[in-house]
Amino acid sequence: MSATAFTALAATLLMVAGGPAPASGPVLVNAGIETPAVHDDPAGGNADADDPAVWVDPEHPGRSIVIGTLKEAGLDVYGLDGKRIQHIAAPPAPSEEGAVGRFNNVDVIYGFELGGKKTDLALVSDRGRDRVRAFAIDPTAVAAGRPPLKDVTAPDVKPVFASGESEVEEQRTAYGLTAFSDDDDAYVVVSQREKTRLRLLQLKDRGGRVGYETEDTLSLPGSFELPDGTDWAPCGDPGERPQVEGMAFDQEEGVLYAAQEAVGLWRIELDDEEFDDADLIDRVREYGTPWTYDEECVLDTANDPGYGGKHLSADVEGVTVYHAADGAGYVLASSQGDDTFAVYEREGRNAYVGSFAVTGGPAVDGVQHSDGSMVVNVPLGAAFPQGLLITHDGDDTPADGDREGTNFKFTRWDAVAGGFPEPLTVDTTSFDPRDAG
């Protein structure tokens, strides 16, 4: 189907997963490594860290790289020691009136046929220019310690959502992004800023450069009928609808998980390169709470009717999938409002498992206001022998004077898994991210 309409009744009947959170609160884990802090000011190049992705080196996983978006400042590439090995600037504005590039989300696919050669790609949503940008990853450069990313975006790619340059300037543009492969084909799902729309794009080889074409479009609901019969929509600026940013695709199950920031976490089936059934598997705590707007949103928490979930505090943000054998594993979502990460079972009805927080430790500070995250199950060298979780930190400390810093934190997956009273699964062999398609 090219677009899906959801009735208010259907939205009301969607199930919220799981039971109450453990009385002891979230599990506390410590990150071991962090990337250099960046600063969203002119001196820092207007850098604001947001979303990470991991490229797994096929020969030596311990020299795998991490790619992180910095919004208006472009991209940084890091080694597993957290040190920066490459910086790529976002595209400049095409004219004095045009918008500059702004890199929001990033994901990786392996083995895309480009110019007759299997090529690994980092794919980025350019919110500023409303495009998807593609960067080839050179394993030889990684091995030699040279900058490994090269822009291979086709020069004539069109806006993902905008019909013209005036709409690009309004910034209702490409926002969240996740990528996946299906046999020899490769796709990205892109969300639209300040709208509920998702768009499925198929990547195309355009003379040795990467282009794309639209396969399908889905609009999630922007308002909901509550159990008491009243209508509710999340608070937002005039004309703004509840957007999606954090997304992850379960390669084995053909399922997209999408975080609608002020609503909750959706599970969306994809069938034959079309969006299919969508279920709201958990709601934010603020779901259904009345509000007023006077230059900013004010929630009337004293009159909260209690229709929200118990595990996510708005905004719900970065989403990632941990694969294990026979459909087991987990879906992780950033509960930005309380600086935790909710964990759901990957199989069945995505029952809630528990929550954790990345807190300050002897090596690095904790994680707050996290936007993007990425988990990898396979061993990545001596530092991460049982997998890696990367989380964006929206409030890096110590601060540099009055300059607020952001960066990325690296945490061993076994440290996360082992912190739970009933340890989470650690499975380093049943899923290979390089062969997920």
Image (cartoon, rainbow, N blue to C red):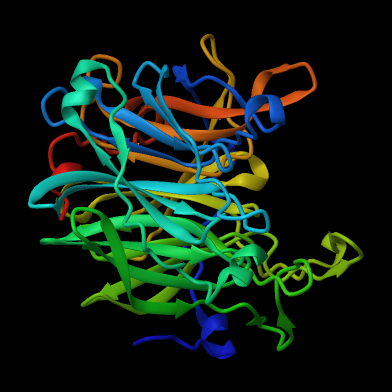
Residue at image x 21%, y 55%?
327
- Give the quadrant of the C terminus: bottom left
- Left or right: where 267 falls relative to 89: left
Direction front: furthest residue: 95
- Relative image position of residue 229 (x, y in whole percent): 71, 89
Q: Nearer the viewer, residue 19 or 434?
A: 434
Question: Which image quadrant for residue 122?
Answer: top left
- Left or right: where 97 falls relative to 101: right
Question: Which image quadrant for residue 249?
Answer: bottom left
- Relative image position of residue 35 (x, y in whole percent): 48, 21
Q: Is residue 307 above or below residue 386?
A: below
- Give the quadrant of the N terminus: bottom left
The answer to whether any part of residue 417 appears in the image is no
Q: Nearer the viewer, residue 169 or 194?
A: 169
Q: Nearer the viewer, residue 191 or 138?
A: 138
Residue at image x 20%, y 36%?
427
The answer to whether any part of residue 297 appears in the image is yes
Residue at image x 75%, y 66%?
236
Direction right: furthest residue: 294
Direction left: furthest residue: 116
Q: Is residue 219 above or below residue 345?
A: below
Q: Nearer the viewer, residue 361 or 108?
A: 108
- Relative image position of residue 157 (x, y in whole percent): 37, 63
- Relative image position of residue 376 (x, y in whole percent): 29, 37
Q: Is residue 268 above or below residue 356?
A: below
